[in-house]
Image (tube, grey):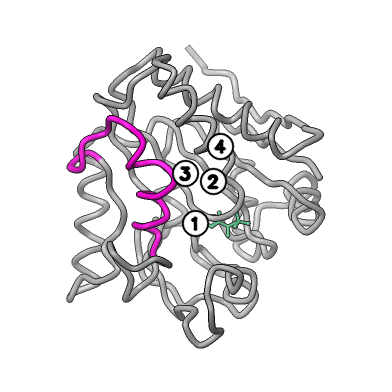
Amino acid sequence: MIKPKIFQWIEVSSYEQMSGIAATIFIDQLLAKPDSVLGLATGGSPLGFYKELVRHHQAGEFSFARATTFNLDEYVGKGPGDATSYHEFMYRNLFRHIDLAENRRHVPNGLAPDLAKECERYERLIAESGGIDLQLLGIGVNGHIGFNEPGTPFDSRTHVVELEEATRSSNARFFDRKEDIPEKAITMGVETIMDARKIVLLAFGDNKMEAVRRLENCTVTEEFPASILRKHPHVRVIYGR
Ligand code: F6R
């Protein structure tokens, strides 16, 4: 049977609406398949989504107990205990509020002594878990997904990247001083993301609209990493301003 391709645009009129729709999609996924493997993102886009997930979870509507999660990325040199690490972001906004055991939640280890080995380990873990069922993405103003900056090969797997100036500037809001913004990160590769069975992309705000418009009209090119999603079999873009 040929599976129909889904590329759905869901326009919303508020950030809260975007968060609620995304949360419903993830909750439905966990209700249908409690041992789902979820791909997670950090940043401003998913904050409201995590709030909603936690609220519904705490109301007893669903459980994370059999789920497994993999985050997209982490800064090199950062890890648990560091307030600006993605480990801490996830702990603060999701993990400490839910019933997901520590050994089932994964974030790349930005403190690993051998980063290349850490990238291999992360890929192996994803494969051993059976692959990602549902991946959450944000989008950078330059079209990055994960930290795959423009020019990243589409066949990339988890790897270490140099962050672009544009990305460091838009993430400056999370740091006290500019010099504290990391220059490198570990990120799932473009192909790692494309292997996810389903993808939900969140984009909200005036500054994201150019990237959304470009995604709508683009040819598939490594210069605009998110463009590869046009080739994915199941994508929902939830966007608004
Ligand atoms: C975060 C990530 C990034 C962000 C993107 C948008 O884990 O991989 O691709 O999703 O930079 O960030 P926000 O949501 O802060 O605008």
Q: Which circle's residue, 1 or 3, is located before the other in the chain? A: 1
Q: Provide the residue designation for mark 4.
A: 49
Q: Provide the residue designation for mark 2.
A: 137
Instruction: Assign a secondary structure to mark 2.
Output: strand
Label 4 or label 1, whichever lies nearer to me, is 4
Q: Looking at the image, which residue sits at the far bottom?
A: 179
Residue 238 shown in magenta: no
- In which of the image's four quarters is ligand 1 placed? bottom right
Ligand 1 within 8 Å, label 2 CB:
yes
Q: Which residues are magenta?
A: 85-104
Q: Nearer the viewer, residue 95 or 165?
A: 95
Q: Decide: marks 2, 1 in contact (CB < 8 A)?
A: yes
Ligand 1 within 8 Å, label 1 CB:
yes
Distance, label 4 to label 2, CA atoms, is 12 Å
Distance, label 2 to label 1, CA atoms, is 7 Å
User: Is the magenta region chiefly helix, strand or loop?
Assistant: helix
Q: Decide: marks 1, 3 in contact (CB < 8 A)?
A: no
**Badge 4 amino acid:** Phe
Q: Which circle's residue, 3 or 2, is located before the other in the chain? A: 2
Q: Position of residue 161 (x, y in %)?
A: 43, 73
Instruction: Assign a secondary structure to mark 4.
Output: helix
Distance, label 1 to label 3, CA atoms, is 11 Å
Instruction: Assign a secondary structure to mark 3.
Output: helix
Instruction: Assign a secondary structure to mark 1.
Output: loop
Q: Is residue 113 above or below residue 26?
A: below
Q: Provide the residue designation for mark 1.
A: 146
Q: Provide the residue designation for mark 3.
A: 194
